[in-house]
Image (cartoon, rainbow, N blue to C red):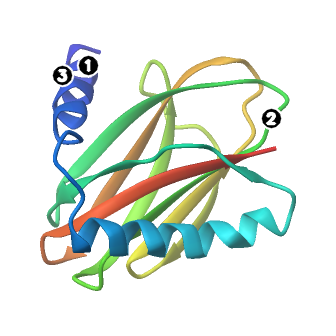
Amino acid sequence: MKRIALALTFFASTLIAAPDDDRVAARRTALDLAGAWSNDGFKLRDGHWAGTFKPGGAKLVQVNLYAGNQYWFTLGTTDKAKKVAVSIFDESGKPVAFERHEDGARAAAGFAPTSSGPFIVKIEELDGQPTAFALIYSYK
């Protein structure tokens, strides 16, 4: 768990930089994909996480989720990324069952927790060049 806490601290420190064109483009990509979930009644949560990563690099985000809700975590990047992924884990780091969507430089994970509490969302670039990313989430 120390490793996850350290990664979360590192991730949070990467969010301080001002947005640039690549981060804006990555957020636009994430919002475009998240629009599909809004057609199913999902509401976009205010705020987002943004930064940069490289192939083989992963970032972790801890979120508090509520039983009875459904969530989609949507990741957008620039065209420099060829393949990205989103995964969800419980607070102990154990993978949970989720619906996966992957489409090159964007990916998403849908999930309905059976209990409320902290969960960890892992985003990673699997193939491509170093790139900006944006992670947003929707709920209903």
| Identity, as a three-letter code, of the amino acid under mark 3 | Leu
Q: Nearer the viewer, residue 116 or 77?
A: 77
| Separation of residues labelled 3 and 2 (CA atoms) | 28 Å
Please state if 61 lies on the left or on the right of 110 as rendered.
left
Residue neighbourhood size for the residue with mark 3, other residues' Cα within 10 Å, grouped as few (<14), some (14–19), many (≥20): few
Q: Secondary structure at mark 1?
A: helix
Q: What quarter of the picture does the N terminus occupy?
A: top left
User: What is the number of the mark on residue 5?
Assistant: 1
User: What is the number of the mark on residue 6?
Assistant: 3
| Separation of residues labelled 2 and 1 (CA atoms) | 25 Å
Q: Are marks 3 and 1 in contact (CB under 8 Å)?
A: yes
Q: Quadrant of residue 100?
A: bottom right
| Separation of residues labelled 3 and 1 (CA atoms) | 4 Å
Residue neighbourhood size for the residue with mark 1, other residues' Cα within 10 Å, grouped as few (<14), some (14–19), many (≥20): few
Image location (x, y in percent) of residue 22: 24, 73
Which residue position holds label 2?
69
Residue neighbourhood size for the residue with mark 2, other residues' Cα within 10 Å, grouped as few (<14), some (14–19), many (≥20): some
Please state if 54 lies on the left or on the right of 68 as rendered.
left
| Identity, as a three-letter code, of the amino acid under mark 1 | Ala
Please state if 36 lies on the left or on the right of 17 as rendered.
right
Please tell me which residue is depicted at 18% across the width and 58% down the height of the picture: 53
Q: Secondary structure at mark 3?
A: helix
Evaluate whether residue 105 shows in this view: yes
| Identity, as a three-letter code, of the amino acid under mark 2 | Asn
Reply above or below: 115 against 137. Answer: above
Please tell me which residue is depicted at 17% across the width and 33% down the height of the picture: 13
Of the two numbered discs 2 and 1 on the same chain, state the one appearing first in sequence: 1
Q: Secondary structure at mark 2?
A: loop
